[in-house]
Amino acid sequence: MVFKLNSHLLSRIASSDGHGEDSPYFDGWKAYDSDPHHPTDNPNGVIQMGLAENQLCFDLIQDWLKKNPKASICSPEGLNEFREIAIFQDYHGLPEFRNAVANFMEKVRGNRVTFDPDRIVMSGGATGAHETIAFCLADPGEAFLVPTPYYPGFDRDLRWRTGVKLIPVDSDSSNNFMVTREALENAYEKAQLDNIKVKGLLITNPSNPLGTILDRETLRSIVRFINEKNIHLVCDEIYAATVFSQPDFISVRRILQEDIECNLDLVHIVYSLSKDMGFPGLRVGIIYSYNDAVVSCARKMSSFGLVSTQTQYLIASMLSDNEFVEMFIRESKRRLAARYRVFTRGLDQVGIECLKTSNAGLFLWMDLSRLLKQQTFKAEMELWRVIIHEVKLNVSPGCSFHCLKPGWFRVCFANMDDETMQVALSRIKTFVNKEADTKKSRKNLRWQGSLKLLNSPRIYDDFINSPHSPIPQSPLVRARN
């Protein structure tokens, strides 16, 4: 018996489309799930390039686990700790876990800043951390400003269950998508005109999807802006350790240590181990706030999404190993830089450009605007469908990131092995070359058609017989007329 669920039986949240599953960002995942690439079992399947995962350093993690079996309470060596860890349920978290995470956050930021372990609140990944922050800072109907393009999941994470609004802060390729004071003011003023109360500004540094970092002056401008407006600043820094070339990453924590006027109660950092360590499945999210009330409230809310004590115990052991942590951060940057060079070199061979200022993240911001039939978002979606269903690559279109101009795509490069990456590059090259040949053929056909038209006797006669023709008419022609 098939039972059709009636929406009137459910809550507004349950029956709404606030999750955003109908976005092309998530549609790409579905296309991959229904036909996943496998080198032998399904070599013609869809290659997943829409998921920002860091799979380049798992060999380092596995080596450490082999050398440190006591880190797992499920191993014979760690069995003695099983009982105490299994029954621990304090939502403050294991003290050694908070200490280790604070230590890791400092090392990722070059030991130029410090973090207080007592201000660390754990959550079920960055997704849970963002929602918790939204619950703490804003009421339904109030808003956060968010510079575009931004991660599509924010529409779910911050809006769906909280009722909070997101207001785009416009940026585009004309200035390499920089966040300007003028754009912030324009978005803030527009919200006021629409009678929407702005409670905060959310920035992602390094940026997803751009793979860029915010420079010191931009960060100082942002801090001055939120301080003057008396609104919160939420800094998503989950890609902090993925900066693989100069300039170095600058955390908002470092700006706050400088000589700048700011109410610290307004500043909050979201972090996780999903990207920097490559542990999205462990669901380790972190809220770091300078506001005592937010720390207290977020800690109580964390009961709905705690990190398991088994995971806390493992992470505490791993991140307390300073020698390993320093080696991992260094080697991860080196491998990301190498993968970036290989991938961009392959794209360059077929004339595909990427955002030149990118030096971080697990992805590229790729410009395919020259492949669009028209410079519209409709044409962008048409191209995206071809890439998904014919080229068999799951890349994410710029419209799903609220990009202002069509033709930009995010392509992830760190979630696959070298062989799969080469297959992906080969498919891209074949597609782009085929498109170029098709355009050339169409151009030749148009040119040949024009030549035939020009060589037509009728056209020639009409042309020379015209009174506007620059060719002098013979007496016979005039007589015939």
Image (cartoon, rainbow, N blue to C red):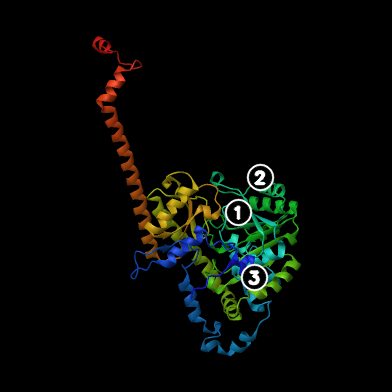
Say which amino acid is labelled 2: Glu
Position of 366 with respect to 156 (left or right) is: left
Which quadrant is home to the C terminus?
A: top left
What residue did someone put label 1 on?
214
Task: Give the class, few, some or many, for how many residues have Cα within 10 Å of label 2's Cα (few <14, many ≥20).
Answer: few
Residue 2 locus on image (x, y percent): 49, 73
Q: Say whether disc 3 or disc 2 marks the residue closer to the N-terminus.
A: 3
Q: Is residue 201 above or below residue 415?
A: above
What residue did someone put label 2 on?
182
Looking at the picture, tell me which residue is in the foreground, 388 or 362: 388
The quarter holding residue 73 reads: bottom right
Residue 45 locus on image (x, y percent): 37, 64
- Callout 2: SS: helix
Which residue sits at x=34%, y=71%?
41
Say which amino acid is labelled 3: Ala
The quarter holding residue 93 reads: bottom right
